[in-house]
Amino acid sequence: MGRGKIEIKKIENVNSRQVTFSKRRGGLLKKAKELAVLCDAQVAVIIFSGTGKLYDFASSCMEQILARYHQTRGRLQLAAADEHADNQVILHEQPTVEIEALKHEIEELHLMNRRLMGKELDELTYNDLHKLEHQLTEGLLSIKDRKEKLILEQMERSNQQIEELRQQARVSNNIENHLSWSKDCCLSSSSMHEWRSKEVASDTSLRLGISPISAIASEPTKMPKLEKSNDVMHLD
């Protein structure tokens, strides 16, 4: 049965940690020796224990191996520094090149703009002038088309506004006509009511023996007061 997988973390028990350190240190030094012998490699191992004790192994002289290490390490650091410096130079040069290209492009655009305005044409050949004339012709046609389109759109908006105003005027006239008709109806109704009132008053006067003309003239009509004395009824 195979061994279970050990979790790699600090061993809290001091005794267990010391035992594990001794076993692992021996195995590491053994593997270093085997690597030096089998592969003809220069191997150096330096170990400090948790208590500060030094353990080391060198396949040859430790000082020579360390000197070679520092020398090689210094060359690598120098090469890395040179590479970093070269990259910085490239990064600084690249924006400069882009800026110069943009400046040149801007100058060309300004020159083209001046030539479109009829300036600085002395250096142009016949073919260049013909191309410039063609560009100006196409530009004028585009401007005219755009201008006509804007005029048509403005006319359409104006017609819509006129139609809206006309519709508002029709609505306003309809409202005024309706109000006038309502007023006439009210007046007619009032006149009819007045005429009926006069008719009723005239009829009442006739029944009471009063002249219709005097009854109508003396509005509102006063009803006669009836008094009863014994068996005879008198009219005031």
Image (spheres, grey):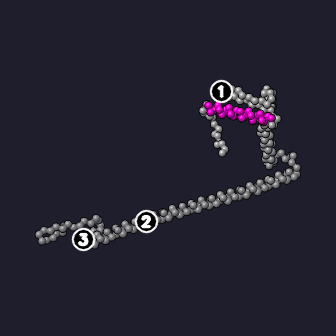
Q: Is residue 18 magenta?
A: yes
Residue type at mark 1 is Thr
Magenta-tinted stretch: 15-37
Q: Quick one: SS at disc 2?
A: helix
Q: Quick one: SS at disc 1?
A: loop
Within 10 Å of disc 2 (Cα), the crowding (few <14, some 14-19, many 20+) is few
Disc 1 to disc 3, C-alpha distance? 146 Å
Considering the whole magenta stretch, tell me its main secondary structure: helix
Identify residue for label 3: 210
Q: Quick one: SS at disc 3?
A: loop
Within 10 Å of disc 1 (Cα), the crowding (few <14, some 14-19, many 20+) is few
- Residue 144 lies, with reference to residue 191, above or below; the image says above
* Residue in the image at 61% along x and 31% along y: 14
Q: Is residue 165 visible?
A: yes
* Residue in the image at 59% along x and 62% along y: 163
Q: Name which quarter of the figure residue 188 lies in.
A: bottom left
Residue 96, label in figure: none
Mark positioned earlier in the residue sequence (1 or 3): 1
Disc 1 to disc 2, C-alpha distance? 115 Å
- Residue 162 lies, with reference to residue 132, above or below; the image says below
Residue type at mark 2 is Ser
Identify residue for label 2: 182
Point out residue 184 in the picture as x, y percentages from the top left corner: 42, 66
The residue mark sitting in front, 1 or 2, is 1
- Residue 43 lies, with reference to residue 134, above or below; the image says above
Point out residue 232 in the picture as x, y percentages from the top left corner: 13, 71
Residue 51, label in figure: 1
Apparent side of residue 222 relative to residue 184 in the rendered image (left or right):
left
* Residue in the image at 46% along x and 65% along y: 178
